[in-house]
Amino acid sequence: MMTRTSLTITLIAAAALAGCKNSDHTIVQGQPDDATNTAANADVQLPPSIAASKIYRCADNKVVYVDWLADNKTANIRTDTNGPPTQVTAPEAGQPMTGPNGYELSGSATEATARIAIPGHPSQSCKA
């Protein structure tokens, strides 16, 4: 019985090795062709980092969360602590930022007050 098992294992191993192709595997080291290196040619721009995160209480007692971004022309507004952000942008730094559905934001990360409009609430003064 032991001889049969050994013979069977030997035949299976021989069949597995017979299926292998014995050829040289040559690896050539060299510089990538810059014309085909899409990562090197891509215009990659990282999003701006968060410069300040502030919680504002508005005149109608509404609480609004604002993440001011470092480019000074983009911010993320949330109406709930863990809610999805709505991004507002301005064409130039220092100008009012606008977003979809009537979102508006005026002010800066360094000021203690901002003027904020969100859907269902008019533009109003809010304090950090």
Image (cartoon, helix red, strand yellow):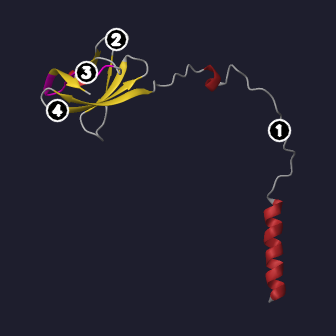
**Residue 25 position within the rendered picture, expressed as x and y whole percent measured from the top left:** 84, 44
Chain-order first, disc 3 or disc 4:
4
Identify the element where label 4 is drawn. loop
Q: Is the Cβ of the residue at disc 3 closer than 8 Å to that at disc 4?
A: no
Task: Point out the image quarter for the C terminus.
Answer: top left
**Residue 39 position within the rendered picture, expressed as x and y whole percent measured from the top left:** 62, 26
Q: CA distance from mark 3 to mark 4?
A: 14 Å
User: Residue placed at 46% from the left, 25% from the top?
Assistant: 47
The region drawn magenta spans 111-122
Report the mark closest to the observer, 4 or 1.
Answer: 4
Report the mark closest to the observer, 1 or 3.
Answer: 3
Query: Is residue 72 one of those drawn in magenta?
Result: no
Amino acid found under the numbered disc labelled 4 = Lys
**Residue that carries the numbered disc 1 in the rendered image:** 27
Chain-order first, disc 4 or disc 2:
4
Amino acid found under the numbered disc labelled 3 = Thr
Q: Is residue 15 left or right of residue 114?
A: right
**Residue that carries the numbered disc 2 in the rendered image:** 94
